[in-house]
Image (spheres, rainbow, N blue to C red):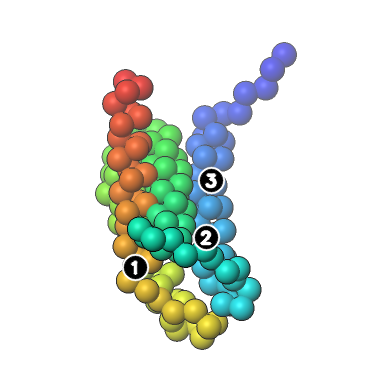
C-alpha cells in the first residue's frame, strides 16, 4: 500500500519552494557588509552581478514551475509568465532599496538590479524552452 498526497498538498509543497528560496535570498542580501566574504575580481562581468543573475534564475524557475502546478483556470497559472517577471523585477528592486535604507554597510546598485533582471529573464526563457520541448 502506498500513500500519495492529494493534488492540493503537492501544489502547496511546490509553492513553498520559491518562497523558501526568496527568504534565503533576502536573508543573504540583507546580511551586514562585514559578514560578506571577499569575492574574486572577474574581467567580463562582476562576480556580484553573476551571483545575482544565478539566484534570480533559480527563483524564476521555481516560481514559474510552482505557478504552472496550479489547477487549470487558476489565475496564477494563467499569468505565470507575467507574475514571475514582475515579481522578480520588483523583488530585486526591493532588495536594493532595503540594502540602501537599512544602513548595514551595504548599498543598492543598479548593476545588481540588472543582474536580477537578467537572471529572471534567463529563468523564464529556460522554462519556456523546457515546456516546448516537453510538450
Q: Which element carries disc 1, helix, strand or loop?
A: helix
**Residue 105 image position (x, y, % from top left):** 53, 83
Say which quarter of the image contains residue 27. Answer: bottom right
**Quadrant where the C terminus lies?**
top left
Q: CA distance from mark 2 to mark 3?
A: 12 Å
**Residue 104 image position (x, y, % from top left):** 54, 82
Compared to residue 3, the image places residue 97 above or below, namely: below
Q: CA distance from mark 1 to mark 3?
A: 26 Å
Q: Nearer the viewer, residue 93 or 19?
A: 93
Res 10 visible: yes
Q: Residue at 37%, 52% (x, y): give it.
A: 119
Q: Residue at 35%, 22% (x, y): give it.
A: 134
Location of mark 1 (residue)? 111
Q: Which element carries disc 3, helix, strand or loop?
A: helix
Q: Residues within 10 Å of mark 3 (few under 14, many from 20)?
A: some
**Residue 65 image position (x, y, % from top left):** 42, 38
Q: Please state which of the two labelled residues, at mark 2 or mark 3, is closer to the viewer.
A: 2
Res 73 visible: no
Q: Residue at 46%, 77% (x, y): give it.
A: 99
Q: CA distance from mark 1 to mark 2?
A: 17 Å
Compared to residue 37, the image places residue 22 above or below, namely: above
Q: Please state which of the two labelled residues, at mark 1 or mark 3, is closer to the viewer.
A: 1
**Quadrant where the N terminus lies?**
top right
- Whichever of callouts 1 and 2 sits on the residue coming sooner in the sequence is 2
- Whichever of callouts 2 and 3 sits on the residue coming sooner in the sequence is 3
Location of mark 3 (residue)? 17
Q: Which residue, as the protein is rendered here, is positioned at the far right?
A: 1
User: Which numbered dot is residue 25?
Assistant: 2
Amino acid at each position: 500500500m502506498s500513500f500519495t498526497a492529494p493534488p492540493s498538498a503537492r501544489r502547496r509543497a511546490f509553492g513553498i519552494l520559491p518562497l523558501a528560496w526568496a527568504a534565503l535570498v533576502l536573508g543573504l542580501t540583507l546580511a551586514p557588509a562585514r559578514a560578506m566574504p571577499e569575492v574574486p575580481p572577474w574581467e567580463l562581468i562582476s562576480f556580484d552581478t553573476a551571483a545575482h543573475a544565478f539566484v534570480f534564475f533559480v527563483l524564476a524557475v521555481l516560481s514559474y514551475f510552482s505557478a504552472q502546478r496550479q489547477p487549470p483556470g487558476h489565475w496564477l497559472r494563467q499569468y505565470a509568465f507575467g507574475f514571475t517577471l514582475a515579481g522578480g523585477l520588483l523583488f530585486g528592486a526591493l532588495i536594493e532599496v532595503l540594502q540602501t535604507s537599512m544602513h548595514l554597510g551595504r548599498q543598492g546598485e543598479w548593476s545588481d538590479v540588472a543582474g536580477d533582471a537578467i537572471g529572471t529573464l534567463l529563468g523564464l526563457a529556460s522554462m519556456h524552452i523546457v515546456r516546448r520541448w516537453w510538450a
